[in-house]
Amino acid sequence: MAVETAPSLSSLGGILGGIIGGEIILDQQQANCVIENLKRYNSLQTTQRYEIYPAIASSRRVLKEASNSPEKIFRQGILIKTTDTGDWYYIGGISPYWSPDQLIVYQGGSQATSPGKLNRKTIDDIADKGLGAIPLIKTKTPPTWYNPPLFKDCQGTFNIFWNYLAEFQGGILTIFTNAPQILLYTQQLLDFRKASLTYSSGGSYYLSIAARNDVMRPASDTYPYIYFAFGTNPVVAKSQGLEIYPGFTFDTVTKEVLSNCSEIMSRGYCSSSFLDYIKFNDIGAPVYAVLPCGTSCSQFGLAGLILDISQITIKGIQLVYLRIAQPPSDLTTTAIIEWAKMMNVYDSLNSLMGASKKFKKAVSDLFVAFPQFIATAAALIVDWVEVSYDDGLKEAEEKAKELKEMYDKVVDELAGKSPSITNRYVYNQWWEYKTRVEECAKEIILNNPDITYEELLNEVDQCAMLE
């Protein structure tokens, strides 16, 4: 699509202003602040760029009608490490098509999981509200983790004036989404690898290893697609106490994106063929904002999460209506609890936090008899919300025995017996390979505690050969 023929957010302000009988102004200075911040992130060569990447989430098990439907299987959100307790949380969308099982979350190619299974009640409760907060664990943490920056208005005494002015203007909202990448990687998985997103076993549909390794992981590690919406200025939303505030955009790429496309995101996203991958469910996607503060800009940061998306027609023009939920006030556990109360999902969060405590105790108790990775993986398969601690520990103990037996068998089969130490070269080669097999097996079991022996053998074999 040519820039000249693309719809503009400025015209959108006119359309909406006509409805309320007033003029909604698009502040060009604010638009400049948005573009400059996006250019800065796109040019970053460090891992700090991950702080704006959306998280991608799915349950390990889904309903039959979602078995190969990415828009039903996957949701987006943010993955954070709390600044007070160091705990991990996913805040974002929950699909009603998920079945009770463990939650899997990827952000920046890094995986986190729920400490045990989500039950049907929790899934239905949060899906009904649109967004939720889920405690997570990370068995492998990057050396440096970047939480998403939070939106801040203009700071300082004189900057009260700029905040006051902002209340009379509409704002450009920036949505970061990995939905197009999910669709693209899914198409490659289905068409070229001839694999599927799920597999059937015992009447249930499980997320495939290929879906995790070849869709979720790479999509979450790819620079997000960006689109703009015209909406309530975050200053207004905060000052008016709006928990949910509106945003509007067109159902196609806008002039403001096309005019700066290759400078604010990957060049490949700017081709007309890529537009086919934009249509998707962006529930949970993070929304960012920034304000002009005289000759400078406020902090560009998280101003909300998409709660709901719908199509509306105004004056014969089809628009996309976004309902955006305010994010937590800060990235502490306390603030997340308060946010959950605001979103009416506190009961679910509270039960999951209780389950997380049981999970951690079980890992500690299992560690007496099993390696740490086995203890952790075994505890992950238990529905700690539903079962008592004693019953859950028994279930985890049985799983730990099974996983330990699988691990030992895979290592023995792939690495074989030790050669004579008298031949140093041969022995060292064997030892290095055996170590790779062990490390691969540990990581794969942690990430896939329900894996079968045949799957584990195949995955470890491929992993060890790539090292």
Image (cartoon, rainbow, N blue to C red):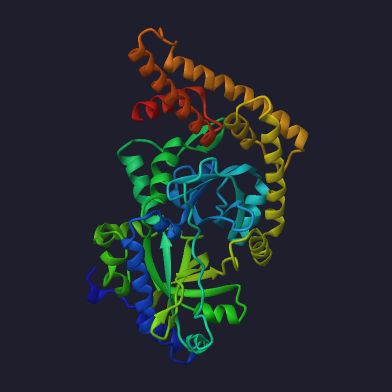
Residue 429: percent from left, percent from top: 36, 18
Q: Quadrant of residue 32?
A: bottom left
Q: Is residue 73 left or right of residue 272?
A: right
* Position of 273 relative to 412 (above/below): below
Residue 346: percent from left, percent from top: 69, 59
Assign the N terminus to one quadrant of the image. bottom left
Q: Is residue 31 left or right of residue 159?
A: left
Residue nearer the viewer, 134 or 404: 404
Residue shown at 39% from the left, 41% from the top? 214
Assign the C terminus to one quadrant of the image. top left
Residue 6: percent from left, percent from top: 28, 74
Residue shown at 44% from the left, 11% from the top? 418
Residue nearer the viewer, 450 or 442: 442
* Position of 383 relative to 4 (above/below): above
Q: Is residue 60 visible?
A: yes
Residue nearer the viewer, 46 or 241: 46
Residue 276: percent from left, percent from top: 31, 58
Q: Is residue 100 visible?
A: no
Residue shown at 63% from the left, 22% from the top? 401
Q: How many marks?
A: 0
